Amino acid sequence: MSGEHILDTDGHDNGDIGGVKIVKEDGIGYSITVNREDLLTAAAGCKEAGFDLLIFVGGVDMPDTIKLVYRMVSTKKVNKLGMIIKTEVPKSDPVIDSVTSIWSSANWHERETYDLLGVKFKGHPNLTRIFMPDDWVGHPLRKDYKDDRMIPFEGFTTNGSDKNE
């Protein structure tokens, strides 16, 4: 197309194209969910489609995986649609390709995700801790993280409900 449409899903809000799940997210734009092996291909496709600014990389610790979210926008498109790429890595092998070769802004975001969640980004130019000291053991945002200096909070159960209810 002439660049007027960033993503064309043939009039469908939800779709599955080549194993990639495409979902329209209200107020955001679109999200795609990919296998970790397909992250670089998806990221390069998003960049080529006009999503030229990566504004966020983050992760969430789940029971068996770490879910990763990459948020980008187009600074040149009039409609200012956003795009999110979702993927996950197993906790037993938290390794994924770095997208710094596609968006240089990923540099510090990937370092933060490495430092706090322990995800290793293959091909990152400087994958070192960004918040914690170099000799720090563990990754503080992992649910299995333990530190003797931590003070347990007794007000809520592990599922988030209030014990007093």
Image (spheres, helix red, strand yellow):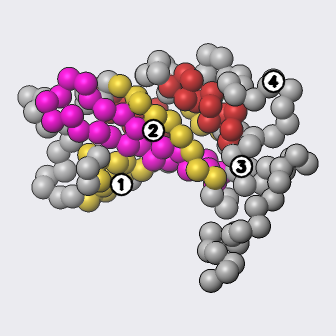
Q: Residue at x 29, y 39 (%)?
A: 82
Residue 75 in magenta?
yes
Q: Locate residue 141 relative to residue 105 in the image: left or right.
A: right
Q: Position of residue 132 (x, y in %)?
A: 75, 29
Marks 3/1: CA–CA distance: 27 Å
- Number of the front mark, 1 or 2: 2
**Residue type, numbered disc 2:** Tyr
Q: Residue at x 80, y 25 (%)?
A: 133
Q: Where is mark 2, residue-wise?
A: 70
Residue type at mark 4 is: Asp
Which residue is under mark 4?
Answer: 134
Q: Amino acid at mark 3?
A: Arg
Mark sitting earlier along the chain (2/3): 2
Question: Residue placed farthest to the right in the image?
Answer: 148
The mark nearer the N terminus, 3 or 4, is: 4
Q: How many other residues sit within 10 Å of disc 4, few (<14), some (14-19) or many (≥20)? A: few
Residue 41 visible to an observer of this rendering: no
Q: Is residue 82 magenta?
A: yes
- SS for dot 3: loop
Q: CA distance from mark 3 to mark 4?
A: 17 Å
From which residue to which does the magenta span run? 65-90
- Residue at the spot 26% in from the left edge and 46% down from the top edge: 29
- Residue 9, position as x, y percentages in the image: 19, 50
